[in-house]
Image: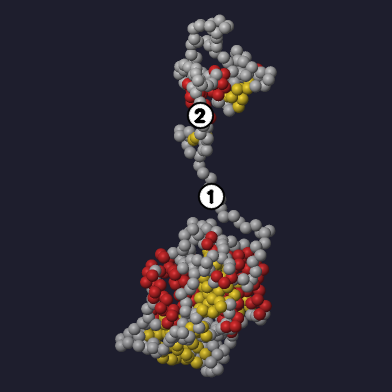
Amino acid sequence: MLRTRPYIRLSAVLLTASLLLLGTLSACDSALLMGPVDTADGRGGEAATDETADADGSAGYDASAGHPIPGRGDGSGADGIALSPAWDPDPGSSDGGDSAAPLPTPISGVGTVTVVPSDPPIDVPPVEVPPIDEPIVDPELPPVPLPDPEPDPEPDPDIEPGGEQAGTLTAGTFDDNLNYDASMAFLLDAAQAAPSYELDGITRGRRIVIRVQDKDEEPIGDARVVVEVPEEVGQQSQAVLDMTTGSDGCVLYHTGIDGGTDAESYVVTVSPPDGSAPVEAIGDPAEPVWTIALPDTESVLPSQLDLAFVIDATGSMSDELEYIKTEIRGIVDEVRHEFPNVDIRFALIVYRDAGDRYLTRVFDFTNDLTQHQSDLADQFAAGGGDLPESMHLALEDAITLDWRETGTARVMFLIADAPPHTYEAAQALEGVLSLRETGVAIYPVAASGVELEAEMVMRTAALLTLGQYVFLTDDSGVGNTHAEPRIPCYHVEHLDRIMIRAIESELAGHAIHPDPLDAIRTVGQPVDGVCEDSTQQQQ
């Protein structure tokens, strides 16, 4: 219960006492301010009924009931105020002679006050009664519980997006495998600047790309590749890698992650996808690329596409999420139109962080484009709070998607603006490695707000899965400021063209590079994805 009237009453009493002391109020004025005199039990006199009101409708103020009091029938005047019979303003003669002065009238709660007239009158400054900004809470009553916080508002399904158009966002792209020296220089610097995010093994050991092709040097996908460290005296050989080639005929072997760092040579066994006899070769650790030919096997391009979008839906993504959703809708429509003979399925995962309304939402692969676009349209940005998010859970959920095994290009766009929490970075890396074993190419898309730690994690994911790092730029004028990536060269293009080209590359079995004439602007000297102004180890 909230109580305010005792405070008002006390202010009136203090004001009355001050003015009486200064001789500027009559008894009627003081009683009118104070209301009825308190009785012995501390309550105001009984309020009269409407039937006892004065003829002129004048009324007093009942401080206990909070409403006007009609005139009383106990000697009150027309104004509803009872005058004390002990006080006569002129008890002597009518001419105001030298009669004895009246006795002062006791006022409840104030004490005895003697009115002394002043001559000349005192100039009394106005008395300000402090306003009541907040109600006074009775300390003896229990506190009123606050209501639970309102949940995130769901978007109105009848309201269309705010005019976002496909082809608005701009971005650059970078292939860390084509520019491996620059990539390692960045990761080494990042590991020193953010040691808590060091992704164990990435900056140690050797990276080797194993390429499987036919007699015409066309890529062979779905070939099983096993790498073994040769047996030593008294020991058996140890398998350090067992993976299947992607649509480009490649797998990545990293000694710092997969093992076999100290080996002087490796035995590589490749089993063709058609079940024919395997081919064995010797790998030299000094060579960054091992090419193995299967002369009796023909290259077959994928006839299926599993396309997954994993999106950070926390509040910091609100400046760009609606545009990204529009871009994805346009990309999906164009891919369906451009590859009518490819069986395309779509999946969606959105994620937030601990304490939010949800951690992840998973929409598994479907051929129903309308359903996929409806699921995407229902998502909106909210929650988060701190910089890192639960990226590791989204990556773990991506592993459980119903990826098809053969004849399929498997592509995942990871769209985010923040890294995983430091204590979950290792789990995020495990998720990336599991997707790598499944043959999924990850194309991270860095939104506004990406800092060193996020770039480090996202570029590592692209490097290990033979994808590319994509980053939004300020050229579109959309969203907050985008950090300049730590990359020596790139073209700026429209995001939808980059993402469509990535899908085309996976379906074609080889990288499709941008036309420099289509670039909005260019940084450095990129030629077919390679920065020519630096020495690189290339695929």
Q: Residue furthest top?
A: 93
Left or right, 337 with reference to 438: right
Q: Earlier in the sequence, mark 1 or mark 2?
A: 2
Residue nearest the viewer, comparing 287 with 210 = 287
Q: Amino acid at mark 2?
A: Pro
Identified at 53% across, 45% down, the residue is 147
Q: Which residue is mark 1?
A: 149
Q: Which residue is mark 2?
A: 125
Q: Amino acid at mark 1?
A: Pro
Of the residues tagged 1 and 2, which is closer to the observer? 2
Residue nearest the viewer, comparing 32 with 536 = 32
Location of residue 226 with respect to 64 vertically, above or below: below
Q: Residue furthest front?
A: 120
Identified at 54% across, 79% down, the residue is 522
The crowding category of the residue bearing disc 2, from other C-alpha atoms within 10 Å (few below 14, some 14 to 19, many at least 20), is: few
Are dots 1 and 2 in contact, CB under 8 Å? Answer: no
Identified at 50% across, 14% down, the residue is 105
How far is the residue under mark 1 from the one under mark 2? 48 Å
The x and y percentages for residue 230 are 36, 87
